[in-house]
Image (tube, rainbow, N blue to C red):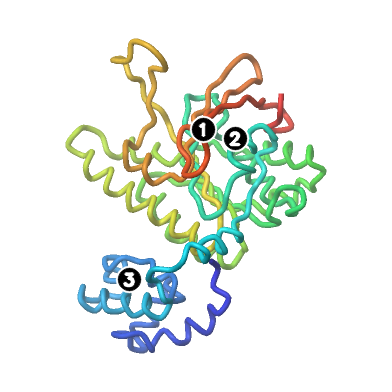
C-alpha cells in the first residue's frame, strides 16, 4: 500500500477540510506527508503535531479518509492487496514453513522466549536476509534495528552475510541501527523511523526488545495501566508503518516466571492481552540441546498452531 502519488498528495494537502498553508506545513514537518498517513492517524496525533483543536483534527482525518475512499469494499480488493505482501526468509526452511513461507510484510511478528532461545539471533538473521533479492527469499531492501538491550552485534551481521555469499561491509551499511535508552526514547525512534523508511527504502523494522524498557520504566501495580496504554499506542504506530509502507515488523519479547503454574511451561510473555491481540503472528522460542531451538506458532490469523525445530550456528539460523 505504498503511495505512488506521494508528491502530488503532499502538495494537495491544503485541499483537505480544515487545512491551510501553515497547518499543512506543520503536518509535513511532523511526518504527515500524504493522505494515507493522515487518514491512519488519530485526532490526538494531529492535535499534538500541528496545535489543532479536536474538532479540526477530526475534520481533517475524515476529509483524508473520504478522498481515499476508505469505506467498505469487496474482499476481492483485499485479496488483490494481499498479492503485494512480501516474505523474508528466516534462513531455515522449516521455520519459513511454520510461518507460511517466511516473515510477512504488513504484519507484526512477535517472538518471545527465555534468554538464549534465539530471539535476537533471528533478528540479526532477518536484518541480513531482507537484503537478498526476491528470488533468494529477500526483498532487496534495508533493515532498521532498534536496540533496547544492547544486544545488536555487527559481528553477527558479518558472519551471517559472509555465509550467504554477501559482501559483509555492504550488509552492515544496509542495517540502520539506533540504541534506545528508555521507553520514551524507544517511542520517539519509532516516530522518527517513518522519515528513514521513506528515504532509505527500508522493508524490515526490528525492535529488540519491545517490552524491556517499558518493564524498567513502569514498576509497580500503580503504573500498569499507564504502561499498557503507552505500549498499545506504540504497537499501533508499528502496525501503521507496516501497513502504509508494506514492510515487516519483527519484535522480540521477554517472558516472566509463573510460579503458580504446576504443570507445563511456567513462563508467560510480557505485554498481556494488548500485545497478544496486536501482534499478527506470535512465536514461542525455546532452547534445546546445544544449537537446537524449538519454535511454536501460538497465534496467526490464517495458520494452524504448530511447532518446528531449527538451529542457531555461526552461519546464522539454519535447518537441523
Is 142 placed above or below 29 here?
above
Name which of mark 2 and mark 3 comes first in the sequence.
3
Name which of mark 3 and mark 1 comes first in the sequence.
3
Q: Are marks 3 and 1 in contact (CB under 8 Å)?
A: no
Q: Are marks 2 and 1 in contact (CB under 8 Å)?
A: yes
Most foreground residue, 101 or 311: 101
Secondary element type, mark 1: strand
Q: How many discs appear? A: 3
Most foreground residue, 78 or 90: 78
Name which of mark 2 and mark 1 comes first in the sequence.
2
Tell me the quarter of the picture where residue 319 sits: top right
Is residue 9 shown left or right of residue 44?
A: right
Binning the other alpha carbons within 10 Å of mark 1 as few (below 14), some (14 to 19) or many (20 upward) gives many
The residue that disc 1 covers is 297
Residue found 61% across the figure and 52% down from its top: 143
Q: CA distance from mark 3 to mark 1?
A: 39 Å
Quarter holding the C terminus is top right
Tell me the quarter of the picture where residue 240 sits: bottom left
Residue found 50% across the figure and 31% down from its top: 305
Is 107 placed above or below 52 here?
above
Residue found 75% across the figure and 49% down from its top: 169
Is residue 37 shown left or right of residue 55?
A: right
The residue that disc 3 covers is 49
Q: CA distance from mark 2 to mark 1?
A: 7 Å
Q: Position of residue 247 (x, y in %)?
A: 56, 56
Q: CA distance from mark 2 to mark 3?
A: 41 Å
Secondary element type, mark 2: helix
The residue that disc 2 covers is 98
Binning the other alpha carbons within 10 Å of mark 3 as few (below 14), some (14 to 19) or many (20 upward) gives some
Tell me the quarter of the picture where residue 257 sits: top left
Q: Position of residue 34 (x, y in %)?
A: 46, 76
Amino acid at each position: 500500500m505504498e503511495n505512488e502519488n506521494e508528491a502530488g498528495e503532499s502538495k494537495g494537502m491544503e485541499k483537505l477540510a480544515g487545512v491551510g498553508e501553515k497547518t499543512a506545513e506543520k503536518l509535513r514537518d511532523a511526518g504527515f506527508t500524504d493522505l494515507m498517513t493522515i487518514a491512519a492517524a488519530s485526532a490526538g496525533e494531529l492535535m499534538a503535531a500541528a496545535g489543532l483543536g479536536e474538532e479540526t483534527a477530526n475534520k481533517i482525518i475524515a476529509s483524508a479518509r473520504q478522498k481515499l475512499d476508505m469505506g467498505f469494499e469487496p474482499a476481492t480488493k483485499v485479496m488483490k492487496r494481499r498479492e503485494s505482501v512480501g516474505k523474508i526468509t528466516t534462513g531455515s526452511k522449516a521455520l519459513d514453513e511454520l510461518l507460511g513461507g517466511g516473515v510477512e510484510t504488513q504484519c507484526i511478528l512477535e517472538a518471545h522466549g527465555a534468554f538464549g532461545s534465539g530471539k535476537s539471533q533471528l533478528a540479526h538473521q532477518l536484518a541480513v536476509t531482507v537484503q537478498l533479492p526476491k528470488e533468494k527469499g529477500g526483498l532487496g531492501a534495508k533493515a532498521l534495528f532498534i536496540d533496547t538491550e544492547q544486544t545488536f552485534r555487527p559481528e553477527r551481521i558479518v558472519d551471517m552475510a559472509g555465509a550467504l555469499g554477501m559482501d559483509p561491509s555492504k550488509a552492515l551499511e544496509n542495517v540502520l541501527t539506533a540504541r534506545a535508552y528508555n521507553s520514551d526514547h524507544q517511542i520517539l525512534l519509532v516516530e522518527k523511523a517513518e522519515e528513514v523508511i521513506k528515504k532509505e527504502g527500508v522493508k524490515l523494522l526490528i525492535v529488540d526488545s519491545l517490552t524491556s524498557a517499558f518493564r524498567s520504566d513502569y514498576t509497580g501495580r500503580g503504573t500498569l495501566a499507564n504502561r499498557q496504554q503507552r505500549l498499545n499506542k506504540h504497537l499501533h504506530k508499528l502496525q501503521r508503518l507496516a501497513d502504509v509502507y508494506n514492510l515487516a515488523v519483527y519484535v522480540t519479547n521477554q517472558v516472566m516466571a509463573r510460579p503458580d503454574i504446576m504443570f507445563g511451561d511456567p513462563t508467560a510473555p510480557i505485554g498481556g492481552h494488548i500485545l497478544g491481540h496486536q501482534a499478527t503472528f506470535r512465536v514461542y522460542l525455546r532452547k534445546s540441546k546445544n544449537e537446537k531451538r524449538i519454535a511454536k506458532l501460538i497465534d496467526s490469523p490464517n495458520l494452524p498452531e504448530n511447532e518446528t525445530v531449527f538451529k542457531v550456528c555461526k552461519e546464522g539460523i539454519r535447518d537441523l
